[in-house]
Structure formats: structure tokens, C-alpha cells
Image (tube, coloured by chain):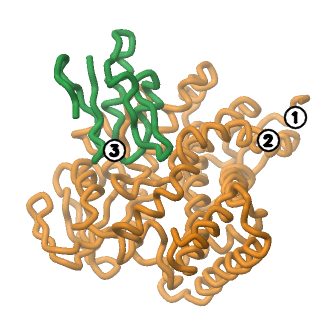
Chain colours: A orange, B green
Amino acid sequence: MRDLEHFDHNAPSTRDDCPALYAELTERCPVFHTDSWGGFWGVSRHATLRRIGRETESFSTGPGVMIPPMGHGHPLVPLETDGERHETYRALLLPHLGPQVVARLDPVVRKVARGMLDELLPGGEADLNEEYAKRIPAVLITRLLGIDYEPQFWEWTETLIYSRLDNGETSSLKEAGEGLYGYFEELIERRRAAGAQGDDLVDLLIRARDDGTIPTEEDLRHLCFFMLIAGLENTAFAIRAALWHFAANPDLRSRLLADRSLIRPALEECLRMYAPITGLARTVTAPVELDGHELGSGDRVMLLFGAAGRDPSVFDSPDEFDMERRGNPHLAFGVGAHRCIGSHLARLEMRIAIEELLDRIPDYELAEPDTTSWHPAGPLVARWTPRSPDAA
Amino acid sequence: MRVAVDKDRCAGHAQCCVLCPSVFDSDEFGYAVLIGDGVVSPEDQSAAADAIEACPERAISRVPEGESDD
């Protein structure tokens, strides 16, 4: 068993080490302790993650889900809330992000994707990470929030997500947090003055604040912030990983081109194998036993979503990409009470992004296959035969 | 064939609805709702089996015919 004492889920070597690491974890060391980032327990078995996801009283998100914390000085709401407050906020947001509501966005997402592809087609080359994978979620989440897209949103959110790993790089992180919160404070004031009667998520949240459903002004701001940041990075990551995978696997891509109905299960396999979020943490609230290990109150436990997606007791040949898997119960969107409420939107964006790109640019190739990775660090430059956009 | 959904476990992933829409619908919050009390016609059995497997929460189970679900 490789050394897990210093396991760091954020280290590039961890990313490079899996699948071998994940397969070993679930079978031989499903609960382990690492001294990284102040110390925490890593858990990897699918069944254990399911249990922890359900037992919210024993395994709380309140003290924070990110290791290390984002560091901007505010909680992530509703992710880092418990009990009634958590249920209230989910009940408020779920109807606006549910499967049927999201399905009605299909033509909107398609139009957005086609517009972007029309711009890219004649050039014959582009960084599909910057110009496509990141742009689609940005346009959609800002549209849902009823706000105009600002390029600064990406700068701020990327700073918040990545510079917390740089131990000590705090000033740009503080600026990013203040930038986003300042933006939402000003927006909320403006919308309130205008009556907040729109059908977008920001006006919905303002109305919920004003009728007391949201008890504090802080929570209103936290919710707006969280909707934006949650709707950007992870979906972009997933689209990028899929674009990379299909370019790196031409036989697979040919099958998708011949049968569009395979795109959905192929994307589920991408989510399973690339797991945009490696893991999120819980804090133990009272002594508890996990797979033979005794955990104490205050202990931090990381749910390793990517590892659970390779649990051999759930997935046959877990390190093989297999679109024919029956069902594919991966945990890329989390598990239990805090299951990602944006999962339906993310899946729609992924599917349409890939469908439209395969329609318009079925021949895209990576410009530098040896140095381009599925991981979001770095561009995803692709080339294709230049062509004109289709006539409407 | 008949299926049941454990509502305490359902977290609203809605993959059952994607894979077997004739048996699984979702409510306004995205939680699973059984169509026709969960009875599965012969032509839907394969899709229903996929839906059971697809649930990340293991919230769906087969119910022996003739038993009522709660």
C-alpha cells in the first residue's frame, strides 16, 4: 500500500496517480488518515460515502467542506448549512433547477453553443477550454441569475478556488472575495429598488429574503455568491475533460458520431472517471465508527467522490471507460442531502456542448496532444478544417 | 415486476427518470415519483433494472409482486 500518511487530494501527483491509487484505496485502505492540511480522514467506498451523505447530523458540512478552506471569510451557503436552514434553502432553489425546468432550457443552451461555434468555425483553431468549455456555463448561470456576464467573474472565482492552495497568497484571494461580494451587494440594492419582480434567481432570492424565508441579509448574499461560483468551474471542467477524452479516443468519437444517443452515457463515464470535484469534507459531530475506525468529534472526513466512482464492488473493471455500464451510479455530483442541486443543469450543458460541437466540428484534433491534459490546468487548443457556419 | 422508492434515501439525482421515464417521474423538487404505483410492464423491465442500478443512493428496490409498498 503506497504511503497515505501524507495523502494530499490537491496535489498534481495525486491526480496523476489515479486510477491505481483509487483502486487500492477502496479495496485495501477504504478509511485512512493523512496529516496533510491539518489532518483528515479519507473515505473512498461507495457505500461509506452513501452513509455519510445521509447521516448529516453525525457528519456536518457546517464547519466547512473544503480542505483547505476557500479562505475568503464567508460560509458557502447552502452547502455549509445544516438542519432546517439547509432544508429551507434547498426547497427554495430546487424547483428552479429541477429536471423539467432545466429540460426547458434545451433550446436556449443549444442557441448559445451554436453561436459560439459559429464564431469559432472559420478560424480552424481555438482554445476550446477558454472559448467553449468555460463560456457555456458562464453564459447559462449568469442568465439564470439574471445578470450580465463579466469576464471578471472567472478571474475572481478561479482565484478563490485555486489560490487557497498557494499557502500565503492571500491578498488576491481577499480582493476576489470582496469583489464578488461587493458586486452582489450593489446588485441586490439595485434590484430591490426596482421591485425585484423578475423570474431570475437573484430576484427570487431577494423576494425570499424580504418575506422572511431567508432570515438574514448575509445569507442572501452568500446564496447569490454560491450560485455563481458553483455554476462555473465544475461544469467547465467536465466539458473540457470530455472534449479531451473524445479527441484522445478516436474510435469512441466515431461511435458517438454514428449514434448520438451514446453521448449521454459517454458523458456519465467522463463524470465517473474524471470527477470534477475530487472530494468534499464533513466534520464529525460525535464519536462514530467508520469501517472499523473510531473517529472523534471534530475529526474531518473527506468524501473522495472520484475514488468512490472506481469502487470495484460497484463498478466492474472500474478503470475502463465503458459507456455500456448499466446505470452508472457515480458520485460526481455528491451524495445524500447535499447532492449538487445544479446536477441537471450541468448534465444539460455538457450534453448540448458536446452534441453541438460534434455536429459542427466532428474532426477537431488536439494541436499538442502530448502536452494537453484532461485536467483544467492549461489550454485545450484544437484544430480542424476551417469552414463557414451553417446557414440558419 | 414492481419497484419502490425509499423517499428518505432519494436525493433527487433523477437518473431513474432519465433511464425509465415510463416508471419514474420527478416532483417539482426533483425527487422521484412512481408512475402507476411502480408496476413495470415487460417491455420496461430492462430500463427499470438500469434505473435501480443507476441510483447513486440505492434508493430504488424491487418489490415482490403482490406486496404493497409503503
For marks 1 and 2 on the same chain, the one whose residue lies earlier in the sequence: 2
Image position, residue A289 (x, y; %): 11, 64
Left or right? Give the position of A241 relative to A388.
Answer: left
Q: Are marks 3 and 2 in contact (CB under 8 Å)?
A: no
Q: Residues within 10 Å of mark 2 (few under 14, many from 20)?
A: many
Q: Are marks 1 and 2 in contact (CB under 8 Å)?
A: yes
Residue to which mark 2 is pinned: A117
The Cα–Cα distance between marks 3 and 2, rounded to whole angstroms, is: 38 Å
Residue to which mark 1 is pinned: A389
Q: Are marks 1 and 3 in contact (CB under 8 Å)?
A: no
Q: Quadrant of residue A358?
A: top right
Visible in this render: residue A25?
A: no
Instruction: Tell me if residue A177 comes above or below residue A105 in the rendering.
Output: below
Instruction: Tell me if residue A324 comes above or below residue A379 in the rendering.
Output: above
Residue at point 85% right, 36% down?
Answer: A386
The Cα–Cα distance between marks 1 and 2, rounded to whole angstroms, is: 8 Å
Residue to which mark 3 is pinned: B10
Q: Amino acid at mark 2?
A: Leu
